[in-house]
Amino acid sequence: MIYSEKVMDHFSNPRNVGAIADADGVGEVGNAKCGDIMKIYLKIENDIITDVKFKTFGCGAAVATSSMATELIKGKPVSEALKLTNKAVVDALDGLPAVKIHCSVLAEEAIKAAIADYLVKQGKNPADYGIKEACNSCCSSCGSSCNEK
Amino acid sequence: MFVYADNAATTKIDPEVLKVMLPFLKENFGNPSTFYSKGREVSLAIEHAREQVAQAIGAKPSEIYFTSCGTESDNWAIRGIASRYTEKRGKHIITTNIEHHAVLHTLKAMEKEGYEVTYLPVDREGFISPHQVEDAIRPDTLLITVMTANNEIGSVQPIVEIGKIARAHKVLFHTDAVQAVGHIPVNVEEMQVDLLSLSAHKFCAPKGIGALYIRKGVLPNNLLQGGGQERGKRPGTENTAAIVGMGAAIEKAVRTMEQNTAKISVLRDRLIAGIMNNIPYCIRNTPTHDMLPGTVNISVRYIEGESLLLLLDMNGICASSGSACASGSLDPSHVLLALGLPHETAHGSVRFSLNHENTIEQVDYIIQTMQSITTRLRDMSPLWENVSKESSFQEKEPVVL
């Protein structure tokens, strides 16, 4: 398994690790059975993501994609964070091995799940913002079904 | 500090072994099948190595066939016996659910070709009982194949008892002894095995060389067709330097086994106790009896194995893991799942495999590094968040040695 220098940098010095006690939005995706879980905490003021933290159980790529995804949305308006794609995370990390692409999908889903939580707390419907319910399982490459948790 | 603790994956070539090999990579380059002296001297060296291998496992030199690796030996044993004896004996094979992939994937392929395979389940410590084997034997049983020692957890199966049963029922018996030879006493007569696979790079010889022991009178068909090498049973120009190295290495491994085992098993027990006593929520996967001298397998709950390996590597420690990510597949190790571990616990497994070159200082360094890495990974694990909220280490499991 060969990781890029950027991946190794974000794995060995992950940015934004931790939790936010009074978070405005919290999202958790993945499952332990498959070997990765990501949890994202958001602090949002005037529609701007002022702070973001993550906790991740998973491989090197799972930690690195979490770290990079949080960096990419920090300080951004919610509307822009919603546009974050897994591809943007992969590109920012100078690529991922093919078998690790699902980690970037998980990172995108984790961000969206946290924003969805924020929107619900605001009395809004995440579906109106184009957020589909995260499947809370592994990516499609994994054998386990969406209902299994 | 640099610590190589992955000797079950491969070993460093012993300098004495390398020295014996070098002439065969330089001036002694002759093809052993030729008639001039340049070839004959190489042929003699190969026959000497064959004697060394035979003596190490209690066999006759004429029962040893050099192959390219342990995987080839396993494939040849199983496929060769099947193609030779299926018509006479049947299409049923008995094995365990913790075999190496060289055996398991061969059998999976054969199931598609109409063979029926019984996978005996191991217990929580990774053992099958001889009774399980006896109960599984049918009139159409062609072969029993049970590994001597497991590569991931180090459990050593009751091969002598299984051998007796196989003999009593007149069923052919193969054992993959790749992890055992050179580390624990292996004797084909005591074990009553008909075929035994071994691989040289597990005992300080080079990669790319293995052997298959085939009992006199047992006649597996060839895997390869070609020239007359290895008495026509395994054609292909011999890997002469590697064969010579294998002979020297196995001779030394057996000669030094007792003193090495005494040293390595102390290191193993220290490592297990050091991790189990200092890191809460760990599960010992290595058995408490009948185990290899150097294998330590532990699951560290709430963290994932690949992350653990990357951080160990950053601290100069080479180890391996049974996590799905580390194995490059989607599922964690079949061996750990066979022990009854849940997927999430299997993902957090780490294997250290020690040999005689490891030291107490290295073991203590591994323990210390494991503590700091585990704290670091758990601090960023959402699973740990819930655990540390709920309790404060009451669940800490006592160490069993």
Image: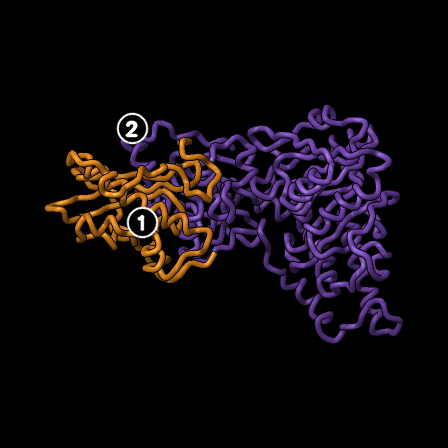
Chain colours: A orange, B purple
- Mark linked to residue B390: 2
Residue B263, image x, y percentages: 57, 46
Chain bearing tag 1 is A
- Please give left or right for residue A109 compared with residue B160 in the image: left
Q: What amino acid type should be assigned to the residue bearing mark 1?
A: Ser
Chain bearing tag 2 is B
Residue B27, image x, y percentages: 74, 76
C-alpha span from label 2 to label 1:
25 Å
Identify the element where label 1 is drawn.
helix
Vertical position of residue B91 compared to residue B253: above or below? above
Query: Residue at 76% across / 53% down in the picture?
Result: B53
Q: Which residue does the numbered mark 1 point to in the structure image? A: A66
Residue B10, image x, y percentages: 59, 54
Query: Residue at 62% across / 30% down in the picture?
Result: B121
Tag 2 and tag 1 share a subunit: no
- Please give left or right for residue B32 compared with residue B99 in the image: right
Query: Residue at 73% across / 49% down in the picture?
Result: B73
The one of B132 and B272 positioned closer to us in this rendering:
B132
The one of A146 and A26 positioned closer to us in this rendering:
A146
Check the image and name the residue furthest to the bottom: B27
Q: Quadrant of the N terminus of chain B?
A: bottom left
- The crowd level at tag 1 (other Cα within 10 Å; few <14, some 14-19, many 20+) is many
Check the image and name the residue furthest to the front: A128
Residue B39, image x, y percentages: 83, 71
Vertical position of residue B88 compared to residue B325: above or below? above
Nearer to us: label 2 or label 1: 1
- Mark linked to residue B143: none
Q: Is residue B278 visible?
A: no
Q: What amino acid type should be assigned to the residue bearing mark 2?
A: Glu
Q: Is residue B62 visible?
A: yes
